[in-house]
Structures are given as structure tokens and as C-alpha cells.
């Protein structure tokens, strides 16, 4: 019999657009080291699908690529309940609404989880094609370590500083 978890990690992105695939790649690596009762999903970033995915979760961690002009592979951590996500989190995808919109809509309709953390990993290459840049690939282990630290601690009260890749 498996133990239910109130904690959920969602790796967001498109593995066929270079570094945009880092969210799903982190999710797959996390599955190898995570506690058995942690729920881990891969998603495209569609607003309504994200809100549906976290509807039963108490604590949610989202992982996605971003492009802010920082060094590729840099890892950022934001408490999405306590601070607004930066504009660079806004995704250019085939969906009309993305992560920022999902969070704000969920806030308006009172459907946010008790804890919502966003990890952004600075990408380098978002061109069509499978595979991550060397810099982003090298930062994945650190991102998984940071997420596991959140999972094993009280996510809401974990430090608010960015992890460095």
C-alpha cells in the first residue's frame, strides 16, 4: 500500500525546444531520488491543466526554464505566494495562458495550494531540437538537491534565496 503525499513537483516545458525541456528533465531525475510518496508530474504549462494538477496538493513546486539574461544554468527560487514571479517567467508557448496566469487565476478563485514554490533555471538555447545545453544540464543536479531540501523541510519556511547552479 502506498502512502499518499500532499507534496507535488511539476516539471514544466517542452523537451523538443532545447533548454525549455529542463523542467521535465528535472522531474525525471527527481523521480530517481525522491521519497516514494512524492507525486511528480511533467506538464506543458497550460494554465488550466496546472491548476487541475495541483487541486489536491498542499505543497507544490513548479520547475521551468526561464530567460532573464543571467548566466545559463543559474537556478532561481521564488515563493509564489509571497512574491510576484518576474516577467521572465511568462512563457511563450502554444497556450494562451501559462504559469504566471495560472497562479494569478488560482489566487483570484481561491485555488492556490498552501505552499507554492517556483524554480526557474536560466536557459541558453530554446531552438527546436531535443537536448539541453551543457550549462543547463550541469545545473540539474543542484536543482534536484535544492528541491529535495524543500521536500524534506517545511517548504513554506525554507530560505527565500536563489540556488546557484
Image (cartoon, grey):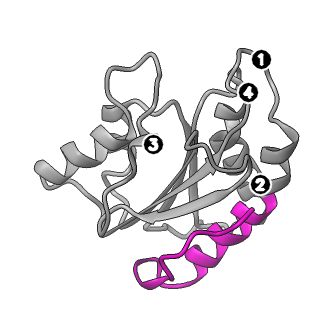
- Report which residue position mark 2 lands on: 140
State the SS at label 2.
helix
Which numbered mark, 3 or 1, is in the foreground of this view?
A: 3
Q: Crowding at label 3, few (<14), some or many (≥20) Cα neighbours within 10 Å?
A: some
- Image quadrant holding the N terminus, namely bottom right
Query: Which disc, if any, is residue 89?
Result: 3
- Magenta span has 159? yes
Which numbered mark, 2 or 3, is in the foreground of this view?
A: 3
Is residue 46 shown left or right of residue 13?
left
State the SS at label 1.
loop
> First in sequence: mark 2 or mark 3?
3
CB contact under 8 Å: marks 2 and 1: no
Marks 4/1: CA–CA distance = 6 Å
CB contact under 8 Å: marks 4 and 1: yes
Where residue 85 appears, x then y in whole percent? 37, 53
- Image quadrant holding the C terminus, namely bottom right
Amino acid at each position: 500500500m502506498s502512502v499518499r503525499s500532499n507534496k507535488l513537483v511539476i516539471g514544466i516545458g517542452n523537451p523538443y525546444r532545447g533548454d525549455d525541456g529542463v523542467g521535465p528533465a528535472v522531474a525525471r531525475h527527481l523521480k530517481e531520488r525522491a521519497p516514494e510518496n512524492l507525486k511528480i508530474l511533467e506538464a506543458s504549462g497550460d494554465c488550466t491543466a496546472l491548476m487541475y494538477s495541483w487541486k489536491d496538493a498542499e505543497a507544490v513546486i513548479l520547475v521551468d526554464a526561464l530567460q532573464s539574461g543571467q548566466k545559463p544554468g543559474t537556478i532561481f527560487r521564488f515563493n509564489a505566494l509571497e512574491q510576484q514571479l518576474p516577467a521572465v517567467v511568462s512563457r511563450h508557448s502554444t497556450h494562451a495562458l501559462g504559469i504566471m496566469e495560472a497562479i494569478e487565476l488560482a489566487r483570484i478563485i481561491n485555488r492556490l495550494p498552501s505552499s507554492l514554490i517556483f524554480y526557474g533555471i536560466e536557459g541558453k538555447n530554446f531552438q527546436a531540437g531535443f537536448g539541453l545545453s551543457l550549462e543547463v544540464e550541469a545545473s540539474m543536479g543542484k536543482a534536484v538537491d535544492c528541491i529535495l531540501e524543500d521536500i524534506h523541510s517545511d517548504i513554506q519556511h525554507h530560505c527565500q534565496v536563489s540556488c546557484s547552479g
